[in-house]
Image (tube, rainbow, N blue to C red):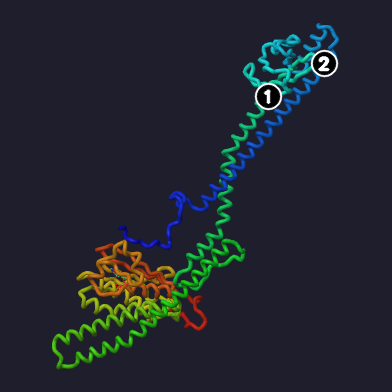
Amino acid sequence: MAPYRPRSRLLPPRGSALKRQISISLRLTIWFGSVFFSVWILFGVTMWANLRHTLTSERHQTLARRIERLQELLRKDASASAADRNQDYSDFAHATGNGLAAVFRPDGTLELPSPSAAASAFSWPKFQTGQSSSFINVHAGGQSHWVLAQPFSLGGRPLVLMAAAPDAGNQVVMQNFLRGLLALMPGLFLIASAAGYWVSRRALRPVDRIAAAARSISIRNISERIPVSGTNDELQRLAETCNAMLDRLESSFQQMKRFTADASHELRGPLTFTRTVAEIGLKDPAIDASSRAAFQDIVDEAAKAAIMLDQMLTLARSDAAPANLVREPVDLAPIVREVFRTTQPIAARQGLHLSLVSNAASAPILGDAPSLKRILWILLDNAIKYSTPNGTITLRLSVVEDEAIIRVEDDGIGIAPSDLPFIFHRFYRADPSRGLVEGNGLGLAIAQWIAETHNARLTAESQPGQGTVFRLAFPLSSIADGAPGTRSMLSYVTA
Ligand code: ADP
Protein backbone atom coordinates (compact mmCIF):
# COMPACT_ATOMS: atom_id res chain seq x y z
CA MET A 1 0.00 0.00 0.00
CA ALA A 2 1.29 3.45 -0.84
CA PRO A 3 2.41 5.39 2.22
CA TYR A 4 0.05 8.11 3.41
CA ARG A 5 1.25 11.59 2.61
CA PRO A 6 -0.59 14.51 4.16
CA ARG A 7 -1.69 17.07 1.61
CA SER A 8 0.17 20.32 1.91
CA ARG A 9 -2.01 23.31 2.76
CA LEU A 10 0.09 25.32 0.38
CA LEU A 11 -0.83 23.38 -2.74
CA PRO A 12 0.50 24.79 -6.00
CA PRO A 13 -2.22 26.66 -7.91
CA ARG A 14 -4.24 24.56 -10.33
CA GLY A 15 -3.79 25.21 -14.03
CA SER A 16 -1.42 24.40 -16.79
CA ALA A 17 2.33 24.81 -16.31
CA LEU A 18 2.33 27.48 -19.01
CA LYS A 19 -0.37 29.46 -17.21
CA ARG A 20 1.72 29.42 -14.06
CA GLN A 21 4.77 30.72 -15.93
CA ILE A 22 2.98 33.69 -17.52
CA SER A 23 2.82 36.81 -15.38
CA ILE A 24 -0.55 38.33 -14.50
CA SER A 25 0.22 41.49 -16.45
CA LEU A 26 1.04 39.43 -19.55
CA ARG A 27 -2.13 37.40 -19.08
CA LEU A 28 -4.18 40.59 -18.75
CA THR A 29 -2.47 41.96 -21.85
CA ILE A 30 -3.36 38.82 -23.82
CA TRP A 31 -6.92 38.93 -22.51
CA PHE A 32 -7.37 42.60 -23.27
CA GLY A 33 -5.76 42.21 -26.71
CA SER A 34 -7.95 39.19 -27.54
CA VAL A 35 -11.18 40.82 -26.35
CA PHE A 36 -10.39 44.04 -28.19
CA PHE A 37 -9.44 42.05 -31.29
CA SER A 38 -12.59 39.89 -31.14
CA VAL A 39 -14.76 43.01 -30.78
CA TRP A 40 -12.98 44.45 -33.79
CA ILE A 41 -13.61 41.28 -35.82
CA LEU A 42 -17.29 41.28 -34.76
CA PHE A 43 -17.58 44.93 -35.67
CA GLY A 44 -15.89 44.29 -39.05
CA VAL A 45 -18.14 41.33 -39.90
CA THR A 46 -21.27 43.28 -38.89
CA MET A 47 -20.23 46.27 -40.97
CA TRP A 48 -19.37 44.00 -43.89
CA ALA A 49 -22.77 42.26 -43.73
CA ASN A 50 -24.51 45.61 -43.42
CA LEU A 51 -22.68 47.04 -46.41
CA ARG A 52 -23.43 43.94 -48.44
CA HIS A 53 -27.11 44.13 -47.55
CA THR A 54 -27.29 47.85 -48.41
CA LEU A 55 -25.54 47.43 -51.77
CA THR A 56 -27.62 44.37 -52.71
CA SER A 57 -30.94 45.94 -51.80
CA GLU A 58 -29.96 49.09 -53.72
CA ARG A 59 -29.29 46.88 -56.76
CA HIS A 60 -32.59 45.05 -56.23
CA GLN A 61 -34.49 48.32 -56.10
CA THR A 62 -32.91 49.45 -59.35
CA LEU A 63 -33.99 46.22 -61.05
CA ALA A 64 -37.51 46.51 -59.57
CA ARG A 65 -37.86 50.06 -60.91
CA ARG A 66 -36.61 48.91 -64.32
CA ILE A 67 -39.19 46.08 -64.48
CA GLU A 68 -41.92 48.50 -63.42
CA ARG A 69 -41.05 50.84 -66.26
CA LEU A 70 -40.89 47.91 -68.68
CA GLN A 71 -44.40 46.91 -67.65
CA GLU A 72 -45.63 50.46 -68.31
CA LEU A 73 -43.93 50.42 -71.71
CA LEU A 74 -45.46 47.07 -72.67
CA ARG A 75 -48.92 48.24 -71.62
CA LYS A 76 -48.49 51.48 -73.56
CA ASP A 77 -47.30 49.64 -76.70
CA ALA A 78 -49.99 46.94 -76.48
CA SER A 79 -51.77 48.31 -79.49
CA ALA A 80 -48.67 49.56 -81.36
CA SER A 81 -47.21 47.80 -84.41
CA ALA A 82 -44.75 45.01 -83.78
CA ALA A 83 -41.90 47.08 -85.31
CA ASP A 84 -42.62 50.12 -83.07
CA ARG A 85 -43.04 47.94 -80.05
CA ASN A 86 -39.76 46.15 -80.71
CA GLN A 87 -37.96 49.47 -81.29
CA ASP A 88 -39.36 51.00 -78.07
CA TYR A 89 -38.39 47.91 -76.16
CA SER A 90 -34.83 47.91 -77.57
CA ASP A 91 -34.42 51.67 -76.81
CA PHE A 92 -35.68 51.13 -73.27
CA ALA A 93 -33.38 48.17 -72.67
CA HIS A 94 -30.32 50.08 -73.91
CA ALA A 95 -31.22 53.21 -71.96
CA THR A 96 -31.78 51.52 -68.62
CA GLY A 97 -29.60 48.45 -68.28
CA ASN A 98 -27.06 48.01 -71.09
CA GLY A 99 -29.65 46.00 -73.01
CA LEU A 100 -29.88 43.25 -70.41
CA ALA A 101 -33.64 42.58 -70.53
CA ALA A 102 -35.86 39.77 -71.80
CA VAL A 103 -39.59 39.09 -72.15
CA PHE A 104 -40.43 35.37 -72.11
CA ARG A 105 -43.57 33.43 -72.91
CA PRO A 106 -44.64 30.65 -70.50
CA ASP A 107 -42.97 28.07 -72.81
CA GLY A 108 -39.63 29.79 -72.45
CA THR A 109 -39.49 31.36 -75.91
CA LEU A 110 -38.90 35.07 -76.34
CA GLU A 111 -42.00 37.25 -76.73
CA LEU A 112 -39.85 40.15 -77.94
CA PRO A 113 -36.53 39.82 -79.74
CA SER A 114 -33.41 40.23 -77.63
CA PRO A 115 -32.60 43.96 -77.44
CA SER A 116 -28.84 43.36 -77.46
CA ALA A 117 -26.19 40.76 -78.20
CA ALA A 118 -25.44 40.68 -74.46
CA ALA A 119 -29.08 39.82 -73.71
CA SER A 120 -29.18 37.00 -76.26
CA ALA A 121 -25.90 35.55 -74.93
CA PHE A 122 -26.97 35.89 -71.33
CA SER A 123 -27.94 32.70 -69.50
CA TRP A 124 -31.39 33.75 -68.24
CA PRO A 125 -32.63 31.56 -65.40
CA LYS A 126 -35.60 29.20 -65.82
CA PHE A 127 -38.77 30.70 -64.40
CA GLN A 128 -42.41 29.48 -64.34
CA THR A 129 -45.19 31.98 -64.91
CA GLY A 130 -46.99 30.78 -61.74
CA GLN A 131 -44.04 31.72 -59.52
CA SER A 132 -43.96 34.98 -57.63
CA SER A 133 -41.33 37.53 -58.59
CA SER A 134 -37.88 36.82 -57.28
CA PHE A 135 -34.24 37.95 -57.42
CA ILE A 136 -31.88 35.29 -58.72
CA ASN A 137 -28.08 35.40 -58.63
CA VAL A 138 -26.63 34.24 -61.91
CA HIS A 139 -23.01 33.75 -62.94
CA ALA A 140 -22.61 34.78 -66.56
CA GLY A 141 -19.75 36.03 -68.70
CA GLY A 142 -17.27 35.45 -65.88
CA GLN A 143 -19.04 37.63 -63.36
CA SER A 144 -22.05 37.50 -61.07
CA HIS A 145 -25.34 39.24 -61.95
CA TRP A 146 -28.62 39.89 -60.19
CA VAL A 147 -31.71 38.98 -62.23
CA LEU A 148 -35.22 40.06 -61.31
CA ALA A 149 -37.83 37.70 -62.79
CA GLN A 150 -41.41 38.89 -62.58
CA PRO A 151 -44.63 37.35 -63.96
CA PHE A 152 -46.69 39.77 -66.03
CA SER A 153 -50.00 39.59 -67.87
CA LEU A 154 -50.40 41.53 -71.13
CA GLY A 155 -53.98 41.52 -72.45
CA GLY A 156 -54.64 38.27 -70.60
CA ARG A 157 -51.50 36.62 -71.92
CA PRO A 158 -49.05 35.45 -69.21
CA LEU A 159 -45.47 36.58 -69.70
CA VAL A 160 -42.27 36.69 -67.61
CA LEU A 161 -40.23 39.91 -67.57
CA MET A 162 -36.57 39.73 -66.69
CA ALA A 163 -33.96 42.43 -66.16
CA ALA A 164 -30.34 41.81 -65.16
CA ALA A 165 -27.56 43.96 -63.73
CA PRO A 166 -23.97 43.02 -62.99
CA ASP A 167 -22.93 42.75 -59.35
CA ALA A 168 -19.21 43.40 -60.04
CA GLY A 169 -19.22 47.01 -58.79
CA ASN A 170 -20.65 45.95 -55.47
CA GLN A 171 -18.19 43.09 -55.23
CA VAL A 172 -15.28 45.49 -55.72
CA VAL A 173 -16.62 47.72 -52.95
CA MET A 174 -17.00 44.67 -50.67
CA GLN A 175 -13.51 43.41 -51.47
CA ASN A 176 -11.98 46.84 -50.81
CA PHE A 177 -13.80 47.03 -47.52
CA LEU A 178 -12.56 43.57 -46.54
CA ARG A 179 -9.02 44.42 -47.60
CA GLY A 180 -9.13 47.58 -45.48
CA LEU A 181 -10.31 45.56 -42.49
CA LEU A 182 -7.52 42.99 -42.93
CA ALA A 183 -4.84 45.66 -43.47
CA LEU A 184 -5.80 47.38 -40.22
CA MET A 185 -5.74 44.11 -38.29
CA PRO A 186 -2.00 43.79 -37.36
CA GLY A 187 -1.79 47.48 -36.40
CA LEU A 188 -4.96 47.23 -34.34
CA PHE A 189 -3.72 44.05 -32.71
CA LEU A 190 -0.51 45.81 -31.69
CA ILE A 191 -2.39 48.85 -30.43
CA ALA A 192 -4.82 46.61 -28.51
CA SER A 193 -1.93 44.68 -26.94
CA ALA A 194 -0.06 47.86 -26.02
CA ALA A 195 -3.24 49.33 -24.54
CA GLY A 196 -3.82 46.05 -22.67
CA TYR A 197 -0.29 46.13 -21.28
CA TRP A 198 -0.65 49.76 -20.23
CA VAL A 199 -4.01 49.11 -18.57
CA SER A 200 -2.71 45.99 -16.79
CA ARG A 201 0.40 47.83 -15.54
CA ARG A 202 -1.77 50.64 -14.24
CA ALA A 203 -4.18 48.19 -12.62
CA LEU A 204 -1.34 46.21 -11.01
CA ARG A 205 0.69 49.19 -9.82
CA PRO A 206 -1.02 49.17 -6.40
CA VAL A 207 -0.20 45.44 -6.15
CA ASP A 208 3.47 46.27 -6.80
CA ARG A 209 3.29 48.91 -4.07
CA ILE A 210 1.77 46.39 -1.64
CA ALA A 211 4.43 43.83 -2.59
CA ALA A 212 7.24 46.39 -2.07
CA ALA A 213 5.80 47.39 1.31
CA ALA A 214 5.42 43.72 2.32
CA ARG A 215 9.00 43.01 1.17
CA SER A 216 10.38 45.85 3.28
CA ILE A 217 8.84 44.36 6.43
CA SER A 218 11.16 41.94 8.18
CA ILE A 219 11.65 40.60 11.66
CA ARG A 220 13.42 43.87 12.52
CA ASN A 221 10.43 46.10 11.68
CA ILE A 222 7.60 43.61 12.03
CA SER A 223 5.37 46.18 13.70
CA GLU A 224 5.19 48.20 10.47
CA ARG A 225 2.11 47.72 8.27
CA ILE A 226 1.16 47.93 4.62
CA PRO A 227 -0.67 51.20 3.80
CA VAL A 228 -4.40 50.57 3.25
CA SER A 229 -5.86 52.54 0.34
CA GLY A 230 -9.45 53.07 1.57
CA THR A 231 -10.82 52.41 -1.92
CA ASN A 232 -12.98 49.55 -0.65
CA ASP A 233 -11.86 47.21 -3.43
CA GLU A 234 -9.89 43.96 -3.81
CA LEU A 235 -6.59 45.79 -3.28
CA GLN A 236 -7.77 47.23 0.01
CA ARG A 237 -8.84 43.72 1.07
CA LEU A 238 -5.45 42.34 0.00
CA ALA A 239 -3.60 44.97 2.07
CA GLU A 240 -5.90 44.33 5.05
CA THR A 241 -5.42 40.57 4.75
CA CYS A 242 -1.62 40.99 4.64
CA ASN A 243 -1.78 43.28 7.67
CA ALA A 244 -3.93 40.78 9.58
CA MET A 245 -1.37 38.10 8.74
CA LEU A 246 1.44 40.39 9.95
CA ASP A 247 -0.53 40.96 13.19
CA ARG A 248 -0.65 37.21 13.78
CA LEU A 249 3.02 36.79 12.86
CA GLU A 250 4.03 39.64 15.13
CA SER A 251 2.09 38.22 18.04
CA SER A 252 3.65 34.73 17.56
CA PHE A 253 7.04 36.33 17.15
CA GLN A 254 6.62 38.35 20.35
CA GLN A 255 5.63 35.17 22.20
CA MET A 256 8.67 33.39 20.82
CA LYS A 257 10.96 36.25 21.80
CA ARG A 258 9.49 36.40 25.31
CA PHE A 259 9.91 32.66 25.63
CA THR A 260 13.56 32.75 24.48
CA ALA A 261 14.38 35.68 26.75
CA ASP A 262 12.57 34.13 29.74
CA ALA A 263 14.05 30.69 29.16
CA SER A 264 17.60 32.07 28.77
CA HIS A 265 17.14 34.17 31.85
CA GLU A 266 15.56 31.45 33.98
CA LEU A 267 18.16 28.85 32.97
CA ARG A 268 21.04 31.01 34.12
CA GLY A 269 20.29 30.45 37.83
CA PRO A 270 20.25 26.61 37.77
CA LEU A 271 23.25 26.63 35.46
CA THR A 272 25.30 28.84 37.75
CA PHE A 273 24.22 26.68 40.69
CA THR A 274 25.29 23.48 38.88
CA ARG A 275 28.64 25.01 37.99
CA THR A 276 29.24 26.25 41.53
CA VAL A 277 28.40 22.82 42.99
CA ALA A 278 30.80 21.16 40.52
CA GLU A 279 33.53 23.69 41.37
CA ILE A 280 33.06 23.01 45.11
CA GLY A 281 33.25 19.29 44.38
CA LEU A 282 36.50 19.84 42.46
CA LYS A 283 38.03 21.57 45.50
CA ASP A 284 37.45 18.47 47.67
CA PRO A 285 40.82 16.67 47.88
CA ALA A 286 39.12 13.40 48.87
CA ILE A 287 37.31 12.74 45.56
CA ASP A 288 38.57 10.03 43.24
CA ALA A 289 39.94 10.66 39.74
CA SER A 290 36.79 9.73 37.80
CA SER A 291 34.59 12.01 39.96
CA ARG A 292 37.12 14.81 39.45
CA ALA A 293 36.96 14.29 35.67
CA ALA A 294 33.16 14.29 35.79
CA PHE A 295 33.08 17.52 37.86
CA GLN A 296 35.54 19.14 35.44
CA ASP A 297 33.31 18.18 32.49
CA ILE A 298 30.33 19.72 34.26
CA VAL A 299 32.25 22.96 34.89
CA ASP A 300 33.42 23.13 31.23
CA GLU A 301 30.03 22.36 29.73
CA ALA A 302 28.29 24.76 32.11
CA ALA A 303 30.71 27.49 31.02
CA LYS A 304 29.84 26.86 27.35
CA ALA A 305 26.12 26.76 28.14
CA ALA A 306 26.44 30.04 30.07
CA ILE A 307 28.07 31.70 27.03
CA MET A 308 25.30 30.40 24.79
CA LEU A 309 22.57 31.57 27.17
CA ASP A 310 24.19 34.97 27.31
CA GLN A 311 24.26 35.14 23.49
CA MET A 312 20.65 34.02 23.23
CA LEU A 313 19.63 36.64 25.74
CA THR A 314 21.53 39.31 23.80
CA LEU A 315 19.74 38.31 20.58
CA ALA A 316 16.34 38.09 22.31
CA ARG A 317 16.88 41.60 23.69
CA SER A 318 18.04 42.84 20.31
CA ASP A 319 14.78 41.51 18.79
CA ALA A 320 12.70 43.13 21.50
CA ALA A 321 14.33 46.53 21.01
CA PRO A 322 16.44 46.48 17.85
CA ALA A 323 17.92 49.95 18.39
CA ASN A 324 18.28 50.06 22.14
CA LEU A 325 21.99 50.83 22.08
CA VAL A 326 22.85 54.32 23.25
CA ARG A 327 25.41 55.56 20.77
CA GLU A 328 27.76 58.37 21.53
CA PRO A 329 30.86 59.76 19.85
CA VAL A 330 33.68 57.24 20.21
CA ASP A 331 37.05 56.80 18.58
CA LEU A 332 37.35 53.41 16.96
CA ALA A 333 41.17 53.51 16.76
CA PRO A 334 41.93 53.02 20.52
CA ILE A 335 39.14 50.40 20.74
CA VAL A 336 40.73 48.43 17.90
CA ARG A 337 44.15 48.74 19.55
CA GLU A 338 42.79 47.57 22.91
CA VAL A 339 41.03 44.52 21.46
CA PHE A 340 44.18 43.72 19.48
CA ARG A 341 46.32 43.87 22.66
CA THR A 342 44.01 41.51 24.57
CA THR A 343 43.65 39.07 21.69
CA GLN A 344 47.25 38.82 20.59
CA PRO A 345 48.41 36.58 23.51
CA ILE A 346 45.48 34.22 22.86
CA ALA A 347 46.43 33.96 19.19
CA ALA A 348 50.07 33.49 20.09
CA ARG A 349 49.19 30.63 22.47
CA GLN A 350 47.52 28.90 19.50
CA GLY A 351 50.67 29.36 17.41
CA LEU A 352 49.09 32.06 15.22
CA HIS A 353 50.54 35.36 14.13
CA LEU A 354 48.14 38.27 14.74
CA SER A 355 49.12 41.73 13.54
CA LEU A 356 47.50 45.15 13.46
CA VAL A 357 47.78 47.44 10.43
CA SER A 358 46.27 50.90 10.74
CA ASN A 359 46.57 54.11 8.76
CA ALA A 360 44.23 55.99 11.06
CA ALA A 361 45.31 57.90 14.14
CA SER A 362 41.64 58.27 14.95
CA ALA A 363 38.35 57.06 13.51
CA PRO A 364 35.45 58.98 15.01
CA ILE A 365 32.11 57.25 14.87
CA LEU A 366 28.87 57.21 16.82
CA GLY A 367 28.82 53.99 18.78
CA ASP A 368 28.62 51.96 21.92
CA ALA A 369 32.16 51.06 23.01
CA PRO A 370 31.35 47.71 24.75
CA SER A 371 29.38 46.53 21.70
CA LEU A 372 32.20 47.61 19.39
CA LYS A 373 34.68 45.60 21.44
CA ARG A 374 32.31 42.67 21.34
CA ILE A 375 31.94 42.66 17.56
CA LEU A 376 35.73 42.86 17.12
CA TRP A 377 36.17 40.07 19.59
CA ILE A 378 33.65 37.86 17.75
CA LEU A 379 35.44 38.38 14.42
CA LEU A 380 38.91 37.84 15.88
CA ASP A 381 37.75 34.85 17.92
CA ASN A 382 36.42 33.26 14.71
CA ALA A 383 39.63 34.05 12.85
CA ILE A 384 41.57 32.30 15.62
CA LYS A 385 39.15 29.35 15.80
CA TYR A 386 39.08 28.73 12.06
CA SER A 387 42.79 29.28 11.36
CA THR A 388 45.13 26.47 10.51
CA PRO A 389 48.36 25.93 12.54
CA ASN A 390 50.96 28.72 12.05
CA GLY A 391 48.28 30.83 10.39
CA THR A 392 48.40 34.59 9.98
CA ILE A 393 45.62 36.93 11.06
CA THR A 394 45.62 40.63 10.17
CA LEU A 395 43.43 43.25 11.80
CA ARG A 396 43.26 46.39 9.67
CA LEU A 397 41.78 49.78 10.42
CA SER A 398 41.62 52.47 7.77
CA VAL A 399 39.70 55.65 7.17
CA VAL A 400 38.57 55.92 3.57
CA GLU A 401 36.55 58.96 2.54
CA ASP A 402 33.65 59.06 4.98
CA GLU A 403 34.02 55.54 6.34
CA ALA A 404 36.04 53.81 9.02
CA ILE A 405 36.81 50.34 7.71
CA ILE A 406 37.89 47.38 9.78
CA ARG A 407 39.06 44.19 8.10
CA VAL A 408 39.75 40.91 9.86
CA GLU A 409 41.72 38.69 7.49
CA ASP A 410 42.80 35.13 8.07
CA ASP A 411 44.35 32.40 5.96
CA GLY A 412 42.38 29.62 7.64
CA ILE A 413 39.92 26.97 6.47
CA GLY A 414 37.67 29.42 4.60
CA ILE A 415 33.95 29.13 3.93
CA ALA A 416 32.31 27.33 1.00
CA PRO A 417 30.33 29.65 -1.37
CA SER A 418 27.19 27.62 -0.56
CA ASP A 419 27.57 28.41 3.16
CA LEU A 420 28.58 32.05 2.83
CA PRO A 421 25.06 33.53 2.48
CA PHE A 422 23.94 31.83 5.71
CA ILE A 423 26.78 32.40 8.17
CA PHE A 424 24.99 35.41 9.72
CA HIS A 425 21.90 33.30 10.44
CA ARG A 426 21.34 32.17 13.99
CA PHE A 427 22.73 28.73 14.86
CA TYR A 428 24.16 28.31 11.36
CA ARG A 429 27.52 26.57 11.25
CA ALA A 430 29.28 25.61 8.04
CA ASP A 431 29.79 21.87 7.88
CA PRO A 432 33.62 21.74 8.32
CA SER A 433 33.39 23.92 11.48
CA ARG A 434 31.05 21.51 13.28
CA GLY A 435 33.67 18.79 13.51
CA LEU A 436 36.67 21.06 13.93
CA VAL A 437 35.90 23.64 16.60
CA GLU A 438 33.51 24.39 19.40
CA GLY A 439 30.82 26.92 18.66
CA ASN A 440 27.10 27.46 18.52
CA GLY A 441 26.56 29.60 15.42
CA LEU A 442 25.36 32.69 17.31
CA GLY A 443 28.48 34.90 17.20
CA LEU A 444 28.01 36.31 13.70
CA ALA A 445 24.27 36.86 14.28
CA ILE A 446 25.20 39.09 17.23
CA ALA A 447 27.95 40.75 15.16
CA GLN A 448 25.43 41.50 12.41
CA TRP A 449 23.00 43.01 14.91
CA ILE A 450 25.73 45.22 16.43
CA ALA A 451 26.74 46.34 12.92
CA GLU A 452 23.13 47.20 12.08
CA THR A 453 22.65 49.23 15.23
CA HIS A 454 25.75 51.24 14.22
CA ASN A 455 24.52 51.71 10.62
CA ALA A 456 27.57 49.73 9.61
CA ARG A 457 27.90 47.11 6.87
CA LEU A 458 29.33 43.74 7.82
CA THR A 459 30.29 41.55 4.86
CA ALA A 460 32.38 38.45 4.33
CA GLU A 461 34.48 37.14 1.46
CA SER A 462 36.06 33.73 1.54
CA GLN A 463 37.89 31.10 -0.45
CA PRO A 464 37.69 27.57 0.98
CA GLY A 465 41.19 26.47 2.03
CA GLN A 466 42.64 29.94 1.50
CA GLY A 467 41.08 32.17 4.10
CA THR A 468 38.35 34.61 4.99
CA VAL A 469 38.02 38.39 5.16
CA PHE A 470 35.32 40.11 7.26
CA ARG A 471 34.83 43.76 6.39
CA LEU A 472 33.09 46.19 8.70
CA ALA A 473 32.38 49.69 7.37
CA PHE A 474 31.19 52.37 9.83
CA PRO A 475 30.03 55.81 8.74
CA LEU A 476 32.42 58.40 10.15
CA SER A 477 30.67 60.82 12.43
CA SER A 478 30.84 64.58 11.95
CA ILE A 479 29.74 67.51 14.07
CA ALA A 480 26.44 67.58 12.20
CA ASP A 481 25.65 64.06 13.50
CA GLY A 482 25.73 65.22 17.11
CA ALA A 483 22.30 64.60 18.47
CA PRO A 484 21.16 66.70 21.44
CA GLY A 485 22.70 65.31 24.57
CA THR A 486 25.63 63.61 22.86
CA ARG A 487 29.13 64.68 23.75
CA SER A 488 31.02 67.12 21.55
CA MET A 489 32.80 65.32 18.74
CA LEU A 490 35.26 68.04 17.88
CA SER A 491 38.14 66.15 19.39
CA TYR A 492 37.43 63.14 17.14
CA VAL A 493 37.13 64.82 13.78
CA THR A 494 40.15 64.04 11.60
CA ALA A 495 41.82 67.00 9.92
P1 ADP B 1 30.43 29.76 15.69
O1 ADP B 1 30.14 29.73 17.14
O2 ADP B 1 30.13 28.46 15.03
O3 ADP B 1 31.79 30.25 15.37
P2 ADP B 1 29.53 32.10 14.30
O4 ADP B 1 28.16 32.66 14.17
O5 ADP B 1 30.56 32.96 14.87
O6 ADP B 1 29.36 30.76 15.09
O7 ADP B 1 30.00 31.65 12.87
C1 ADP B 1 29.10 30.92 12.05
C2 ADP B 1 29.87 30.02 11.13
O8 ADP B 1 30.57 30.81 10.16
C3 ADP B 1 30.91 29.21 11.80
O9 ADP B 1 30.39 28.03 12.35
C4 ADP B 1 31.88 28.91 10.68
O10 ADP B 1 31.42 27.81 9.93
C5 ADP B 1 31.79 30.15 9.82
N1 ADP B 1 32.89 31.10 10.08
C6 ADP B 1 32.83 32.25 10.79
N2 ADP B 1 34.01 32.89 10.78
C7 ADP B 1 34.86 32.12 10.05
C8 ADP B 1 36.23 32.24 9.66
N3 ADP B 1 36.98 33.28 10.00
N4 ADP B 1 36.73 31.27 8.88
C9 ADP B 1 35.99 30.20 8.48
N5 ADP B 1 34.69 30.04 8.83
C10 ADP B 1 34.13 30.97 9.60
Q: Which quadrant of the view contains residue 369?
A: bottom left
Answer yes or no: do the residues labelled 1 and 2 have beta carbons within 8 Å?
no
Quadrant of the displayed image that contains ligand 1:
bottom left
**x then y, percent, for residue 434:** 25, 70
* Label annotation for residue 450: none
- Tag 1: amino acid: Gly
| Residue in front for this viewpoint, 254 or 305 | 254
Q: Which quadrant of the view contains residue 340?
A: bottom left
Which residue in the protein does label 2 denote? Answer: 73
Q: Secondary structure at mark 2?
A: helix
**x then y, percent, for residue 302:** 27, 83
- Dot 1 crowding, Cα within 10 Å, few <14, some 14–19, many 20+: few
Q: Which quadrant of the view contains residue 425?
A: bottom left
Mark 1 or mark 2, earlier in chain: 2
Q: Is residue 411 left or right of residue 321?
A: left
| Residue in front for this viewpoint, 216 or 89 | 89
Q: Is residue 226 visible?
A: yes
Q: Is residue 53 left or right of residue 18?
A: right
- Tag 2: amino acid: Leu
Distance (Cα) linking label 1 and label 2: 28 Å
The residue depicted at 66 percent of the width and 23 percent of the height is: 137
Q: Looking at the rendering, in which quadrant would you find the C terminus?
A: bottom left
Q: Secondary structure at mark 1?
A: helix
**x then y, percent, for residue 390:** 20, 71
Which residue in the protein does label 1 denote? Answer: 169
- Relative to 316, is 99 above or below? above
**x then y, percent, for residue 296:** 20, 85
The residue depicted at 61 percent of the width and 64 percent of the height is: 232
The residue depicted at 44 percent of the width and 70 percent of the height is: 402
Q: Is residue 465 left or right of residue 104?
A: left
| Residue in front for this viewpoint, 270 or 311 | 270
| Residue in front for this viewpoint, 16 or 351 | 16
